[in-house]
Structures are given as C-alpha cells and as structure tokens.
Amino acid sequence: MREEQKVPMTGVLGGGVFGSGTDDLSDLRHLVDEIGARSFEARIGYRTLPDPLDSAAWRHLEDAGLTRLGSDTDSGGGPAEVAVTLRSLARYAVTVPVAETDLLAGWLATTAGLDIPDTGPLTVAAGRASRSGGRIIAHLTDVPYAAEAAAVVLALRDGDRLMVAVGDPARLSVTRGRNTGGEPRDHVSVDESYDSFTAAGTIDELTRRGAWARCMQTLGALDAAVEFSVAHTREREQFGRPLSAFQSVQHNLATMAGEVERARAAANLAVAAAVDFGFEDPRTDFAVTAAKVTLGQVVPGVVTAAHQLHGAIGVTLEHRLWLVTMRARCWIEEFGDTAHYARRLGRLLLSGADPWDVLIGRVG
C-alpha cells in the first residue's frame, strides 16, 4: 500500500444511513457533496431527456482539480480519491463525465502518448474496428457524452490489438442518444486514417476501469435511494402516524440499508485493490468482478423497495428518486453485466483454483 495512504480502505466509501465520523478524505467528501447539492438544486424542474452535461458543475469540479485526480500525476490523487468523487457525484445525480475523463480517456491517452486538451470533458469510444485500405472504420454505440466532449479518445480493437487515437467531435459523425437514466449515450461513426492510431493499453484494463467506476457510481445512487426512502417515510403520515412507525416499513428500510452495506463492502474491496495493486493486477480484476456481481444482485431489490416505499410517486423524471434508481440500473449493466461477471467467478472455481485463493483474490 502507498505509505501516504492513511485512510482505512473500509472507510473510503463511507456514508449512507450509517455514515459517521471523519477521516482524511472528509474534506474531499464534503467538497464534492457541496458541488453535487448545488447542481441538484439548480436543475430541479429543468431536467430533460437526454439530460445534458451540467457545464456549471463541470466548471466547479475542474476549478477544484477534481476532474483528473487519477490521470494527472501532479494532482496528488489516486483511486481512493476518485472513488469518493464518483460516489458523491452519483448520489446527487450530477450529469458530468468525470469517470470517462479521468479513469478512461485520460489514462488511455497518457498510456498511448497522445495529446489531449488540458481542460474540458473527455470520453472514450470503444468497440471493434474494421480496416478498409489504409483506413479504420467503426460504428460505436452508447458512447457517453460524445457530442459534448472536448475530445473523444478512440479505443478500437483490431484483431488482438487495441488501437488508440484522439478524435475531434467536430470531425466525427455523432448522433445524440441517451440511456434510460437520461444520461447522454451517443452513436459515433469513425472513418480515420490507420496512421493516426497507435497500439496502447489493453481492452481488459479499459473494461476493468470502466466497471470499477460504474460500481462506485452505482453505490452512490443506492445510498441516495435509501436516504430518500428514509426521509419520505418519516415525513409521510398515514392513520395519524409517520410511515416509518409501521413495522413492515421499518423492515423494508432495514433490509435496504443492509443490502447497500453489503454492496459497500464489495466496492471498498475494489478500491483497496486498486490502491494497493493498480488496475492492471489480477487481484484488482478479482475484486472488481466480485463488486460487479454483488452490486448487480443488490440493485434490483433496493430499487424496487425504494419505489414501493414512495408509493405512487418517484417514477417520473421530475422526482429525485427516479434519477438515482434509473441510473443505478443503467450503470450496473455497463462494461459487462452481472451475468457476465458471475460466469467469470464461476469459471475461476471450476478451473481447479483453490477456493481460498479465489476468495482473497490470489489468482493470476
């Protein structure tokens, strides 16, 4: 572990209904929460489908040095700080591509030795490519924020190689789209010279980084869903009593909170692995796989219970619950769905590996 890392990894993603105390990341957590709360309040009544980039929030994050904590070696940040930032932004449904800019595009461009803009949001467009003469052709779907990015880092599989280039959104063919949580997910058509690409990075690490980021964001959304449900059941009355006084409601709230804490433990394991070993290490691969499976199991039950506790509200774009529950459902399916990662765990056990080695991540 890095000597300067003083925060116990079990506390990095602290928060939710059981959050208490302070640690070395408290100031960062409070700063991001403040930016997130300001963004959320400013956009009440102004959400649309798709929900465009929150440029005001992006400026605040950029001014605070929070958009490239992991990819800028001078930032002093790392996976723990990035995890705190992603969880808090997701908790307030802030529509900004911090994960794409920092963990994906920034890392990949640096690995490939390519120049990217110093400011502004970035994204990665990943997928398979075909070659036609001296050109690379690709049609990529569900690219986050492509139409609003300062640059699009292209990560295209050409056989066993990952070919990387920096694309100008003005020169690419971009068709706007969205996911069911309202976030921009665009279609990008690529027709670029083969000479403009360089081989760098691996698709496995790119996918692992993306899956790791989505786990952090999903946890933030689940925290918000529980917090909203607790507040709603305390404020809403039936038969002269708040809903939270009814035993069945208390049971549902306790079950939700317990499931989210289970997800938090798995996410914290993934943070600890990334801090200790880096994203390229097999132990981090195992931890991210476990987190993806656990969060994938938790999301449906927590989302369903949250909407049930809210009764007939919380199912439209205008309600804050909709934003976090729909995004949680989208995020947990990106960079590989739950079934994909569950099969990976199963294959590890069936391959003859010692179950204890699998459990603690000592696999290679």
Image (cartoon, rainbow, N blue to C red):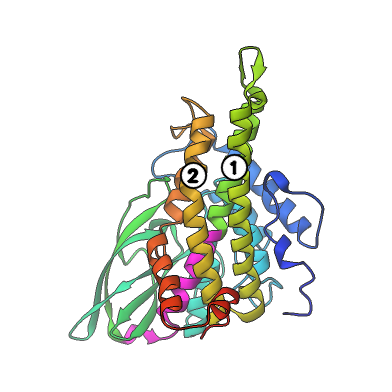
Residue at left offset 32%, top offset 71%: 127
Instruction: Note whether 115 is above or below 254 in the view shown.
Output: below
Instruction: Note whether 125 is above or below 279 in the view shown.
Output: above
Residue at left offset 58%, top offset 78%: 356
In the image, 132 versus 305, the foreground residue is: 305
Instruction: Note whether 248 is above or below 148 in the view shown.
Output: above
Magenta stretch: give its range.
195-215
Q: 362 left or right of 334?
A: right
Residue identifier under label 2: 301
In the image, 234 versus 52, the foreground residue is: 234
Q: Quadrant of the N terminus?
A: bottom right
Q: Give the x, y percent position of residue 245.
A: 67, 24
Residue identifier under label 1: 255
Q: Tag 2: Cα neighbours inside 10 Å, few (<14), some, or many (≥20)?
A: few
Q: Amino acid at mark 2?
A: Gly
Asked if residue 98 is among those painted magenta in the image, a careful observer would answer no
- Magenta-drawn stretch, dominant element (helix, strand or loop): helix
In the image, 102 versus 361, the foreground residue is: 361
Asked if residue 202 is among those painted magenta in the image, a careful observer would answer yes
Q: Amino acid at mark 1?
A: Thr
Residue at left offset 60%, top offset 55%: 262
State whether residue 345 appears in this view. Answer: yes
Q: For the residue labelled by badge 1, is the local secondary structure a helix, a strand or a loop?
A: helix
Is mark 2 in CB contact (under 8 Å) with mark 1? Answer: yes
Q: Give the x, y percent position of residue 180.
A: 38, 46
Q: Give the x, y percent position of residue 166.
A: 41, 75
